[in-house]
Image (cartoon, rainbow, N blue to C red):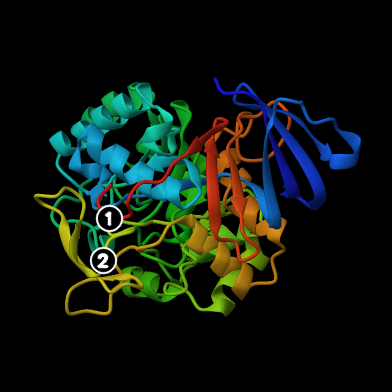
Amino acid sequence: MAGPIAFHGTVILPDALLPDGLLIVEEGRISALGRRADLVTPPDAKLVRAQDGYISPGFIDIHCHGGGGSDYMDGSVEAVRIANRAHARHGTTTLLPTTTTGTRAQLNDMLDAVEAAQREWSIDDGAKIAGVHWYGPYFAPDKVGAHPKGMERLPDPEEYEPALRRGIIKSATCAAELPGAVEFCIAARSAGCLVTCGHSNASWSEMAAVYDAGMRHVDHFWNAMSSSDSIRRRLGTPQQGSMAEFVLYHAEMSTEVIADGCHHAPEMLQFIFRMKGSQRLCLVSDTSRALDMPPGRYVLGHYESGEPFENTGRVGVLPGESKLASTVFALDQMVRTMTRDTDATLPEVIRMASLTPAERIGIAADCGSLEVGKAADILVLSSQLEVISTFISGQQFAPRSAFGA
């Protein structure tokens, strides 16, 4: 382990800014934090100055599909590492590799690859792995979106119970209206997962059933989720409440938003921030293998059977359509957009990209904020919130070439 590091500048705390702050890192952990005038810098410490920028906790992405040309569903350790390096270049220090729809074999290969990458992690591998987000394949047939078609299916205990027993899954998604959804949620909750609902056309009563079974989170608000109008078309009158109303009504429910500047207009970002607040709203990238790659055609999911989409340079879209197909940016873009387009303070925005997701998946005791005793997952940001340097467990990540590395 390298010697101590002293970070000097404006420190972003969960609820405030600390100007002229000093943060000391020793043996990969934060050993001291306070105003520079009140602390003594170890004489052998490497000094890192933020100048007119900020010292921030590393970002935590609980919903991401790949990057640098690789998708986590490709099912190889190197694909996982390529994607994790791409995210680390943008300040993500911890993440949940996220599944798409796919065959049972593809999902097993993905879990195997992520477990191996987590077990063998070194700083050159990029972002740390907190676990897996089991996202596909339990999607409603009319809400598959840009994921591989024809591989969505009902939750099957013969498939998900062995997967949950591995212990690698930390977040688990199922459309609430599917037969077997309640049983899946009970099993996922018992396995210690954040239980989520997504790619669903569920009604209020269907949401209530999985809520009672442990569901407390909804994936990417407004995207691939029901509305009161879609529920009316599915179930008739009287018009029933949807996922949106259910999330906004229940204080314990959290959700996430894709703030890439293309998915949602500023008033929508402002609305969901005001409705849920920084302690129940997570920023996610939901990005694909197109992160850090040039515009062109790619696939979401396994490289052989994934769903084709176009990277326009701004967002992913299905070919020949306006339907959105994941993002092409990482969490740093979401942080800048949320800061620009809402009245959330900088500590609130950073919280939504760090501590709040850490709390929701149960890792906040070790990371997610700059506190004494926590892992030294630290970013130096410019005054414009560009990532200058990324430190993971006290080690500086050295970015490689953006394309394909």
Dot 1, how many residues are within 10 Å of its Cα: few (below 14), some (14-19), or many (20+)?
some
Relative to 268, does residue 78 appear above or below in the rendering? above
Quarter occupied by residue 181: top left
Q: Which amino acid type corresponds to the residue marked 1 in the rendered image? A: Phe
Q: Position of residue 84 (x, y in %)?
A: 37, 42
Position of residue 20 measured from the top left corner of the image (x, y, whole percent): 82, 49
223 up-or-down from 191: above or below: below
Q: Nearer the viewer, residue 115 or 47?
A: 47
Instruction: State the residue in front, 272 or 300.
Output: 300
Earlier-in-chain disc, 2 versus 1: 2
**188, 274: nearer the viewer:** 274
Q: Position of residue 346 (x, y in %)?
A: 69, 60
Q: Which mark is residue 403?
A: 1
**Residue located at (36% from left, 57% from top):** 287
Quadrant for residue 143, please give it.
Answer: bottom left
Residue 154 visible in the picture: yes
- Label 2's element? loop
Separation of marks 2 and 1 at Cα, in angstroms: 8 Å
**110 w.r.t. 65: above or below:** above
Q: Is 374 left, or right, of 147 in this rendering?
A: right
Outermost residue, front side: 43
Q: Which of the numbered marks, if any, corresponds to residue 294?
A: 2
Question: Which is more toward the observer, 337 or 209?
Answer: 337
Outermost residue toward the left in this view = 304
Residue at the location (65% across, 51% down)? 351
Q: In the structure shown, which secondary structural element does the residue marked by tag 1 occupy?
A: loop
- Residue at left offset 69%, top offset 65%: 344
Amino acid type, label 2:
Pro
Seen at 49% across and 63% down, the residue is 333
Task: Please report contact status of discs 2 and 1: CB closer than 8 Å, yes or no.
Answer: yes
